[in-house]
Amino acid sequence: MIEAVIVDDEIKALQSLSWELTNFSDEIKVEASFTDPFEALTYLEKNTPDCLFLDIEMPTMDGFQFIQKLTNKNFPVVITTAYNQYAIKALKNEAIDYLLKPIDTDDLKDTIVKIRKHNAKNFTAERLERLLLNFNSNSKHKKITFNTDGKLVFLDSDEILYAESDGNYSTIFLADGHKIVLTKKLKEVNELLPADSFFRIHNSFIINLTKIKEFLKTDGYVILESNHKIPVSRQKKSDFLDML
């Protein structure tokens, strides 16, 4: 299903295009339509349609100004206009196509084909990230997800030894010897980790309880399977023993 948004200050033109799209195919849905370009910009800051049909001639803000103000550009734009001289400028402004009003059904059909090809080729990172996160949240074997260095890292609990604070950053130490640096405070990292297998044993450390090899009660340290020595704070000692 192609989800479309229409922006056109002329209500009759907007209704006409909406009717054309709705009746063109069961695979196209007009998700939202706006006569006010400012309202449309606000909507598009939070929503990513499959395509945008945008009128050029609008009194408060023309279509080219609208495109420049878009902060979210992860969708193709189709310019709609009654004036053919805008065609070249439209394409230079990263529009995938333009349609002359009144819109011809065959022209619309060609435009839809272009939208499909564009979206198939440009499956954006943002959409892929959303797909992965949704899949993981619904998975029977849910993994822990960390967002770092422009990528998503999915880990099983068993792969994590402990996490250490470094001010506004945190480092995740993995069983295979690798590290992951996050731009998150340890408190935020703690919220991502399952409470049944991880414990914040110190203001600066979170450990995987399944990785403990020894607990040195007198010295106040735990030794992990990797032989890392992690301090147990006096404030956390009682709660830690209860967890064990």
Image: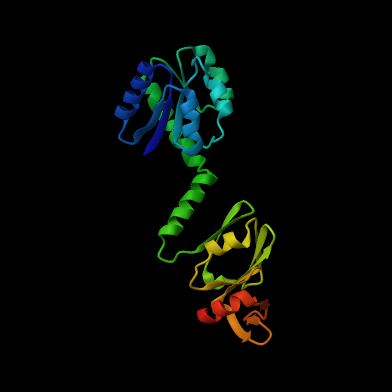
Foreground residue among 100 and 56 = 56
Display coloring: rainbow
Up the image or down, 149 lies above or below 156; here it is above
From this viewpoint, is residue 103 visible? no
Q: From the viewer's perspective, is 15 left or right of 100?
A: left
Q: Quadrant of residue 21?
A: top left
Foreground residue among 46 and 185 = 185
Q: How many marks?
A: 0
Up the image or down, 200 lies above or below 64; here it is below
Q: Quadrant of residue 152?
A: bottom right
Residue 52: x and y, percent? Answer: 46, 29
Up the image or down, 208 lies above or below 102; here it is below
Q: Residue at x 54, y 46 (%)?
A: 125
Residue 90: x and y, percent? Answer: 54, 21
From this viewpoint, is residue 14 visible? yes
Residue 183: x and y, percent? Answer: 65, 55
Q: From the viewer's perspective, is 63 left or right of 103?
A: right
Q: Residue at x 51, y 73 (%)?
A: 197
Please state, as top left, top right, bottom left or bottom right, where the N terminus lies in the image: top left
Q: Residue at x 69, y 85 (%)?
A: 219
